[in-house]
Image (cartoon, coloured by chain):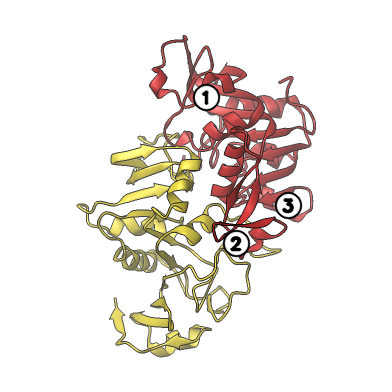
Chain colours: A yellow, B red
Amino acid sequence: MGMGIDTRNLMAKRAAQEVKDGMVVNLGIGIPSLVPNHLPSNMNVMFHAENGVLGMGPSPEVGKEDGNLCNAGGYPVSIIAGASYFDSAIAFAIIRRGLVDLTILGALQVSQNGDLANWIVPGKRVPGMGGAIDLAQKAKRVIVVMNHTNKDGSSKIVKSCSLPLTAKGCVHLIITELAVMEVAEEGLRLLEIMKPYTLEDVLKLTDAEILIDKEIAFME
Amino acid sequence: MSHINDGCTIMFGGFGGIGTPPTIIKAILESGKKDFTLIGNDTGFPTIGIGPLVAEGRVRRIITSHIGSNPIAGKLMTEGKLEVEFCPQGTLAERIRAGGVGLSGVLLDVGLNTVVEKGKAIIEVNGNRCMIETALTADVSIVYAQKSDTYGNLVYDKSARNTNPLVAMAGDVTFVEVEEIVEKGSINPEEVVTPGCFVDGVIQGEGVYWKWVWE
């Protein structure tokens, strides 16, 4: 399953629909960082970064970067009117106090009841959790944007996570290049399918119980 | 450099290398000292921030939240040459802050029901289960700030503030690298972020010598 820029942007565009006026939003690295490109310019959103910025704006022009003004991934950003700087303790106070309305992040595995695994593949890749546990557990709403399957074709949406958890039952919405699913009380509900994929594709490539009790929208 | 000895615990400010004091790091690298225990947000990048100290094998143990941007750290960890204690980022900040403000620890529920709770004392407070997260201090704290006056009052610069004000309070001794040293009285007291009594020494920085990831 190739992940060209169009696919990445399609997923980011879909995630952007979940961002509402007035929200405080924290974006993970990778596809989530593309979300602001798909928001209307008149929307009031305060982007939060774990390294101590509230009110991040777009990337600065080449040559106008400031080495002391970056996002949590280490890349230069700008700020918008109303922005503030603070230390890491306050950055995480904002998270733990539930003031982050929405976080959009990547994942290694998500279970059908919303458990998230995204910080370690034991024995293989041990990047560390960074701020992911704090965000997943404390943000009001958690959206995962990820490839539907691993490189070997196995599903990243599973009945139960085999990798160590970041947080239990924290995910509200999953967006992949195939589909959009919500984690509801009743189960994992299929909401949308990305064209040209079909319901058969989604069922075949998802190793979890899927609830289909609403009319499915087809997105392009 | 007389406070940096083989085997000592060094706490460093910075986040992805931004706000990590380059001139002090260079001096530690040149000193040849080793077997450090480090405490800090992340391991930087291989050539950025604290990264080179880790990459050169000068670190025995690190308490941190993230090593993903420095693949050499992961390799040394897998080979058993670097002991890594992972801590959620916000919890790490609070453990450092606790050390800096004279508390023995903090009570947190971040990471309950995950491997984070392993080996931790758990208590119930007002009906909520929390872990006791112990305070962190260090033999030496190294900090980067934009400006210091001759008393050591510090002002930071944008997102280079990050963990620095917390780290500045948590060292038995604290050394600060700044872009500018000014006379006492020339920083508005309302704007001081770290009061000078926490600071033991200030050096004039020579600027960043590494290339940032985006350059």
Which residue in the structure is indicated by mark 2?
Answer: B112
Q: Residue B181: percent from the left, percent from the top?
A: 49, 14
Dot 3 or dot 2: first in sequence order is 3
State the image quarter where residue A3 is shown.
Answer: bottom left
Ranked by sequence position, the earlier of labels 1 and 2 is 2
Check disc 3 and report the residue beneath it.
B77
Chain of the residue under the numbered disc 1 shown in the image: B
- Residue displayed at 34% across by 82% down: A196
Q: Nearer the viewer, mark 1 or mark 2?
A: 2
Task: Name which residue type carries label 2.
Answer: Leu
Q: Which residue is mark 1?
A: B207
Q: Chain of mark 2?
A: B
Give the label, 3 or 1, closer to the camera: 3
- Do residues under tags 3 and 1 come within 8 Å of each other at their CB atoms? no
- Classify 10 Å Cα crowding around label 1: few (below 14), some (14-19), many (20 and above): few
Report whether A181 appears left or right of B21.
Answer: left
Instruction: Name the image quarter holding residue A182.
Output: bottom left
